[in-house]
Amino acid sequence: MVNFSLEGKIALITGASYGIGFAIATAYAEAGATIVFNDINQELVDKGLAAYKEQGIEAHGYVCDVTDENAVNDFIAKIEKEIGIIDILVNNAGIIKRIPMIEMKAEEFRQVIDVDLVGPFIVSKAVIPGMIRKGHGKIINICSMMSELGRETVSAYAAAKGGLKMLTRNICSEYGEYNIQCNGIGPGYIETPQTAPLRERQPDGSRHPFDAFIVAKTPAGRWGTTEDLKGPAVFLASDASNFVNGHILYVDGGILAYIGKQPS
Ligand code: NAP
Ligand code: GCO
């Protein structure tokens, strides 16, 4: 029987107090994993712990900024000492700044690159030695439509997510021999706080133009939900995907395959 179980596995999901990370963590818990997560401040960690408890999940939550290499190294050492070596890492923590490129400050560009690309590098670098010692590991990087496509105002985010696609392939290349599989999930447009500004109702009560645009660009004719990501995430974390490596699994309702619905 194909093994989708995560029984006995320790899973670290970064930035997982809510949103996509939280949904993936709950799916991993349902599949039997021990859940460890971090977020940027204690308030968010406490909010996350309460939300996991509501789902009947005794998660382990820590404050850790994924861009701070010393803090991450201390964080991973603490997990390995208190809970055990990490089997599954999901690099989920991320930010976006929607600013026209020629108006964006270099410091704002760097902030997005730092969280969305350097952060996954730092956390993966801290986790891989334990995976090598353990003889296996799964790393799943949360990429994006912007790993493949550009659009106005998201130059930093697209650059980061394009880089994250290639970091995924490089970890696959460099550590595949240690039975470590590194893949990406490329969500389409998902209903979370990060995309809430793109779905806000207009003053006259009509849909946000971008909302209607995305629905027209998606064969499924809808935004995704975090529920849509759970199955693909469990697959890539389980033994069922042990020969899948360096792959970006787009969970986008078909956006990347579709030219878009002709305006009526
Ligand atoms: P979200 O709602 O903004 O959640 C991101 C989480 O990461 C938040 O808890 C955030 O904390 C945390 N975080 C931010 N900076 C951090 C740092 N330096 N260290 C640790 N944690 C940090 O985002 P989401 O929509 O759930 O997206 C999660 C991931 O999926 C992101 O990588 C995003 O780029 C990607 N993604 C999202 C979509 C979508 O449509 N929503 C589609 C494709 C890919 P704060 O609340 O303090 O910021
Ligand atoms: C945007 C959105 C997207 C989504 C996601 C799409 O402003 O275009 O925020 O970037 O977050 O990354 O896959």
Image (spheres, rainbow, N blue to C red):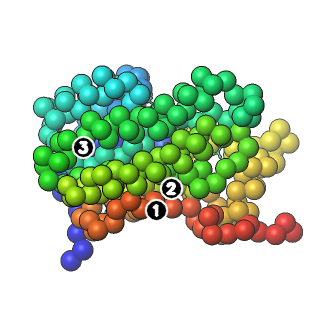
Q: Give me the disc on residue 128.
A: 3
Bin the neighbour count of mark 3 within 10 Å (Cα to Cα): few under 14, some 14-19, many 20 and up: many
Mark 1 and mark 2 in contact? Answer it, CB < 8 Å: yes
- Near-viewer residue (243 or 233): 243
Q: Earlier in the sequence, mark 1 or mark 2?
A: 2
The answer as to whether callout 1 falls within 8 Å of ligand 1 is no
- Which three-letter amino acid code belongs to the residue tagged 2? Gly
Label 1 sits on a secondary structure element that is strand
Residue 10 seen in the current view: no
Q: Is 16 in front, or is 47?
A: 16
Q: Tell me the number on the disc at residue 249.
A: 1
Amino acid type assigned to the residue bearing label 1 in the image: Leu
Q: Quadrant of residue 155?
A: top right
Per the image, the residue denoted by label 2 is 186
Q: Secondary structure at mark 3?
A: helix
Q: Secondary structure at mark 2?
A: strand
Relative side of 201 to 52, left or right: right
Residue pictured at 58% horizontal, 65% vertical: 253
